[in-house]
Structure formats: C-alpha cells, structure tokens
C-alpha cells in the first residue's frame, strides 16, 4: 500500500513490494514501538531536531533503545528521498522493539526494527479551503493519561482508527 516505491528497512533500501519484517516483530504483535511523521519541504525535513527530540522522549518513555544518533536518521531520510525522487513529501519513521520471544516481557537484547517510507505530499484539495470540512465528536475515547503516556507517538492507533470509521459512517 501507499505511494512508496523504495523503502528503508533497518538501513537498507529496497522496493516496497519486497520489504519484509518478521511476523515475530513486537511492533506487529504488541504495538510495541513508536513513530514520527515528517513533512519534507524542498527536500528538507521540517523541524527535524524537534522530531528527533520527540522520538527520543517516546523511546525513553517506553524503555526502547534509540539505536542511532539523529545524523544517521537524517542521512537515511535524505537517501530515501533521493531514491524516490521526492522533494515535497511525508516521511514516516517507525521504530519497533524488534523481534523477541512471545510474551509481554520486552527482550533486553532485541535489535530495534527501523522502517522508513516516503510518499509525495501534494497538499489538500482546494475545495477544503473554500468549503471547510465537517467533524464529529466521536463516542470512543482515548485512554486516560495514567493508562498510556499521551506524549508517546506509539504504534497503538486503534482508537483513532475507530473514531475515523465512526466519523465516516456519520458522513
């Protein structure tokens, strides 16, 4: 899915159709990971350092080791953008705890899985700017802050997905 032709998995560029992660990856099994989405303007990530700081806070909050410095991630993003010939884009960076034994206890030695993909950003339809859009107050609620840290951009977005489905049903 998506518009990505070339993606990066653990620092290796490959065609999106051939990219694979283990079925035992904790991001898939338990939502055990974090992400950042960066807007790219003219080939440059907007507020890159702010995204890196938030990624660091998120990983620290869930006890996940950030495996590389910010400069490594910046090189990966630049390489990915060149490979896809993109200058105005969205880049999604996903970091999972990696492959580990089945069970809730996070493995202490697992190597994190790092996934990056980019897709073109063309803006929003002009009609939205003229007409606006409609919204609802969804019946589903986010977990309270003492249940799930609200400042962590975790992979667990089921609440958002269910709210979006409810909004679509209501038009």
Image (tube, rainbow, N blue to C red):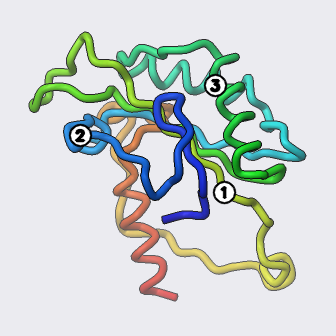
Residue 96 horizontal side relative to residue 124, left or right: left
Query: Which sits earlier in the primary sequence, circle 2 or circle 1?
Result: 2
Residue 162 horizontal side relative to residue 136, left or right: left
- Residue that badge 3 annotates: 73
Report the front residue among 129 and 22.
Answer: 22
Report the front residue among 116 and 136.
Answer: 116
The structure residue drawn at horizontal position 46% and vertical position 70%, both measured from the top left corner, is 164
Query: Which sits earlier in the primary sequence, circle 3 or circle 1?
Result: 3
The quarter of the picture where residue 102 lies is top left
Q: Position of residue 170 (x, y in %)?
A: 46, 86
| Mark 3 → mark 1, Cα distance in angstroms | 17 Å
Above or below 15: residue 148:
above
Query: Which sits earlier in the primary sequence, circle 2 or circle 3?
Result: 2
| Mark 2 → mark 1, Cα distance in angstroms | 26 Å
Q: Farthest right residue?
A: 42
The structure residue drawn at horizontal position 43% and vertical position 48%, both measured from the top left corner, is 19
Report the front residue among 167 and 77.
Answer: 77
- Residue that badge 2 annotates: 30
| Mark 2 → mark 3, Cα distance in angstroms | 24 Å
The quarter of the picture where residue 63 lies is top left
Residue 7 horizontal side relative to residue 103, left or right: right
- Residue that badge 1 annotates: 119
Q: Position of residue 169 (x, y in %)?
A: 42, 86
Above or below 109: residue 19:
below
Numbered disc in front, either 2 or 1: 1
């Amino acid at each position: 899915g998506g518009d990505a032709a070339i993606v990066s998995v653990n620092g290796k560029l490959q065609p999106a159709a051939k990219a694979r992660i283990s079925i035992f990856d904790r991001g898939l099994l338990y939502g055990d990971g974090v992400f950042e989405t960066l807007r790219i303007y003219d080939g440059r990530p907007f507020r890159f350092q702010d995204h890196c700081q938030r990624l660091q806070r998120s990983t620290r909050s869930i006890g996940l080791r950030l495996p590389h410095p910010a400069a490594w991630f910046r090189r990966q993003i630049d390489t990915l953008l060149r490979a896809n010939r993109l200058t105005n884009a969205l880049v999604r960076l996903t970091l999972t705890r990696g492959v580990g034994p089945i069970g809730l206890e996070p493995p202490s030695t697992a190597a994190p899985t790092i996934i990056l993909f980019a897709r073109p950003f063309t803006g929003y339809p002009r009609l939205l700017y003229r007409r606006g859009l409609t919204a609802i107050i969804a019946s589903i609620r986010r977990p309270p802050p003492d249940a799930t840290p609200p400042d962590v951009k975790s992979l667990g977005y089921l609440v958002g997905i269910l709210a979006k489905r409810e909004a679509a049903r209501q038009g």
